[in-house]
């Protein structure tokens, strides 16, 4: 899921390197540069963000939570910035719930891969096994749905989707209605020959999971993953409301047509995100989740190896496996949905996890990459 505008940080350089080592300060430690990078990113996102072509508009992210946990360095640093609610000025809290957007894909595809382990389906099965009437279904494998190489058009990029969110974003659609918007649009490329990120892929996988299990996808995610890992602050909701009794951050949109952020907390009916991006969590649960997901404890070693076979995700300067992104040995996923941007990533080799969570639709993949680059330079 994508942000609609190009955001820039009006600094001479955000975090191009770990240049803040204080070699003459006896109180400095090896991890000080990481703290400095996180502080600069958080402060810059919440005070110096602008939109290209609309520099007169305050495009700051209202709030952020950024964290690093490293067993390798025996170090952790979790810091909150800004506010979770621009009306009440409630400070951002590290344990606040966020909509996590496409991080949902890591859960859904993990469930699918568990069904592979259970021999209920194969990665090499063709889409035609389940949906023979889908265009070119005999050419598309389920592996290609998982790693975004199917070529199937992304329904979020269709004119039907644009009209829907402009005219009646709170109206619901069925998964098949959403898929139908992309179904008859020509493929981006021949299946298996290239990469294009497409929410339609994950909707199809969600429907296949429901066919194989006889359960709703949210039930399978909860029973197999959320409950197993005791993720008490993680939910696959079917309504827009956040769970009662738990603190959450409001989400905001900034664009060139509005002088200031617009509340998008309940802007889009969850049927338009569903298996591709409907879930809610907080930074602490996501740490537990990504360590299990990237560490392979939820799948057989054979299936985990298949998951980690990567293809280039050039637009993001990353690689992509089966529902998982990779950058320099760190594995995880980002999530953008109206009002929120989140990213969680983990290196099993270095036993290190990094997270960035924003309450604004401001795609900041580079922020987490800069933290990783700083970490690797130590």
Image: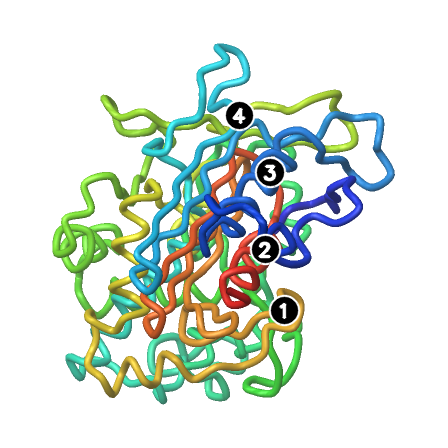
Q: Which residue is mark 3?
A: 165
- Residue 106 place in picture, x, y as percent: 36, 62
Q: Which mark is residue 317?
A: 1
The residue drawn where x is 75% and y is 44% is: 8
Q: Which circle, 2 or 3, is nearer the viewer?
A: 2
* Residue density around tag 3, few if under 14, some if 14–19, many if 20 or more, within 10 Å: some
The residue drawn where x is 54% and y is 46% is: 25
Q: Which mark is residue 36?
A: none
The residue drawn where x is 25% and y is 54% is: 288
| Left or right of 259 in this view: 92 | left
* Residue density around tag 4, few if under 14, some if 14–19, many if 20 or more, within 10 Å: many
* Residue density around tag 1, few if under 14, some if 14–19, many if 20 or more, within 10 Å: few
Q: Which residue of the protein is positioned furthest toward the right in this rendering?
A: 53
Q: Which mark is residue 365?
A: 2
C-beta proximity under 8 Å, tags 2 and 4: no
Which comes before the other along the chain, label 2 or label 1?
A: 1
Q: Which mark is residue 82?
A: 4
C-beta proximity under 8 Å, tags 2 and 1: yes
Query: Helix, strand, or loop for circle 4?
Result: strand
Given residues 237 and 335, the one toward you in this image is: 335
Given residues 71 and 215, the one toward you in this image is: 71
- Residue 62 place in picture, x, y as percent: 57, 27
Q: Which circle, 4 or 3, is nearer the viewer?
A: 4
Distance from disc 2 to disc 4, alpha carbons, whole Å, reads 19 Å
Which comes before the other along the chain, label 4 or label 3?
A: 4
Q: How is the image coloured?
A: rainbow
Question: Quadrant of the rendered structure where residue 152 is?
Answer: bottom right
| Left or right of 15 in this view: 102 | left
Distance from disc 2 to disc 3, alpha carbons, whole Å, reads 25 Å
């Amino acid at each position: 899921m994508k942000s609609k505008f190009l955001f820039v940080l009006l600094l001479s350089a955000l975090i191009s390197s770990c240049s803040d080592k204080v070699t003459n300060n006896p109180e400095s430690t090896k991890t000080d540069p990481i703290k400095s990078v996180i502080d600069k990113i958080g402060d810059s996102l919440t005070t110096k963000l602008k939109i290209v072509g609309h520099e007169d508009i305050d495009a700051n992210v209202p709030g952020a939570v950024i964290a690093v946990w490293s067993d390798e360095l025996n170090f952790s640093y979790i810091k909150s910035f800004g506010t979770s609610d621009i009306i009440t000025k409630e400070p951002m809290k590290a344990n606040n719930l966020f909509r996590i957007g496409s991080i949902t894909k890591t859960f859904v595809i993990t469930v699918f891969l568990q069904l592979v382990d259970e021999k209920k389906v194969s990665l090499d099965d063709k889409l035609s096994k389940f949906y023979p009437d889908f265009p070119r279904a005999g050419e598309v494998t389920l592996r290609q749905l998982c790693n975004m190489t199917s070529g199937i058009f992304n329904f979020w990029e269709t004119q039907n989707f644009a009209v829907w969110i402009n005219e009646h974003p709170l109206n619901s659609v069925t998964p098949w209605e959403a898929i139908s918007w992309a179904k008859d649009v020509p493929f981006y490329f021949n299946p298996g020959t290239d990469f294009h990120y497409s929410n339609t892929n994950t909707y199809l996988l969600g429907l296949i999971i429901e066919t194989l299990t006889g359960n709703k996808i949210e039930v399978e995610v909860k029973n197999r993953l959320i409950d197993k890992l005791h993720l008490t602050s993680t939910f696959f909701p079917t309504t827009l409301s956040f769970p009662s009794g738990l603190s959450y951050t409001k989400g905001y949109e900034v664009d060139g047509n509005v002088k200031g952020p617009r509340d998008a907390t309940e802007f889009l009916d969850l049927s338009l995100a569903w298996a591709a991006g409907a879930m809610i969590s907080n930074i602490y649960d996501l740490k537990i989740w990504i360590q299990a997901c990237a560490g392979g404890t939820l799948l057989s070693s054979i299936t985990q190896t298949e998951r980690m076979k990567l293809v280039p995700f050039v637009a993001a300067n990353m690689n992509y496996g089966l529902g998982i992104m990779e950058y320099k040995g760190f594995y995880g996923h980002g999530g953008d949905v109206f009002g929120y941007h989140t990213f969680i990533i983990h290196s099993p080799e270095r036993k290190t996890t990094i997270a960035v969570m924003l309450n604004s639709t401001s795609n900041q993949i580079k922020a987490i990459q800069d933290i990783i680059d700083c970490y690797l330079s130590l």
